[in-house]
Amino acid sequence: MSAHARNQRFAAAQETVRALQDELAETNRGILALTIEVNEQVKALTAELHAAHEELERTNSELLQLTLELDDRVAARTAELKAKDEEIRAMSQQLWQAAKLATMGELVASIAHELNNPLATVSLRVEMLVGTMAPDAPHRRALEVIEQEVERMGQLVANLLQFTR
């Protein structure tokens, strides 16, 4: 091979190497630009992720505060409801007692009526008999005792009625 042919081959090889070097430089510039772009996107995504994380932390803090407030409100309302329940129970007990007393009053009034009628009849008859007897009659004293006992029973019935009122 002649020197000229060698030189031509060498020049062609150098030209190929230069072209490859240019392509390599262009590829390196592209890789560098792509790396910069990826780094910028990673920074942007990292900032967005950091902002989202901060927002999540803030939201969690707000939710925790709201949960605590709700727990306090539920506890307060529960205490109010328990107090109302106790009040209702006490009122129900009082109403039950009042109903029992009213029933007892009705029963006493009915018994008093049933006792007063015969007592009035007995009192009237004894008074009439005592009025027709002589002051020294042998049975007069027994009738006066009956009259006193009828009056005492009448007073007991009156006291029962008074008590139920």
Image: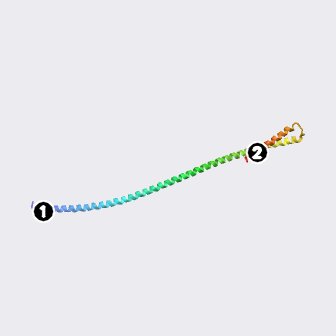
Nearer-N-terminus badge (1/2): 1
- Tag 1 residue: 7
**Residue 40 sits in quarter:** bottom left
Q: Secondary structure at mark 1?
A: helix
State the residue lying farthest toward the top.
138
Q: Are marks 1 and 2 in contact (CB under 8 Å)?
A: no
**Which quarter of the figure is the N terminus placed in?**
bottom left
Circle 1 packing at 10 Å, graded few (<14), some (14-19), many (20+), is few
Percent from the top left, x then y, of residue 30? 27, 61
Percent from the top left, x then y, of residue 64? 47, 54
Q: Is residue 115 left or right of residue 37?
A: right
Percent from the top left, x then y, of residue 38? 32, 59
Vertical arrangement, residue 67 with respect to residue 124, above or below:
below
Count every numbered label the image shows and give the total: 2
Q: Which mark is residue 130?
A: none
Residue at the image position 81 percent from the left and 41 percent from the top: 150
Q: Which mark is residue 159?
A: 2
Residue at the image position 23 percent from the left and 62 percent from the top: 25
Percent from the top left, x then y, of residue 22? 22, 63
Q: CA distance from mark 1 to mark 2?
A: 150 Å
Q: Nearer the viewer, residue 123 or 156?
A: 156
Amino acid type, label 1 = Asn
Q: Is residue 127 left or right of residue 60?
A: right
Q: Secondary structure at mark 2?
A: helix
Q: Is residue 25 left or right of residue 104?
A: left
Residue at the image position 37 percent from the left and 59 percent from the top: 47
Vertical arrangement, residue 98 with respect to residue 38, above or below:
above
Residue at the image position 30 percent from the left and 60 percent from the top: 35
Amino acid type, label 2 = Asn
Vertical arrangement, residue 128 with respect to residue 28, above or below:
above
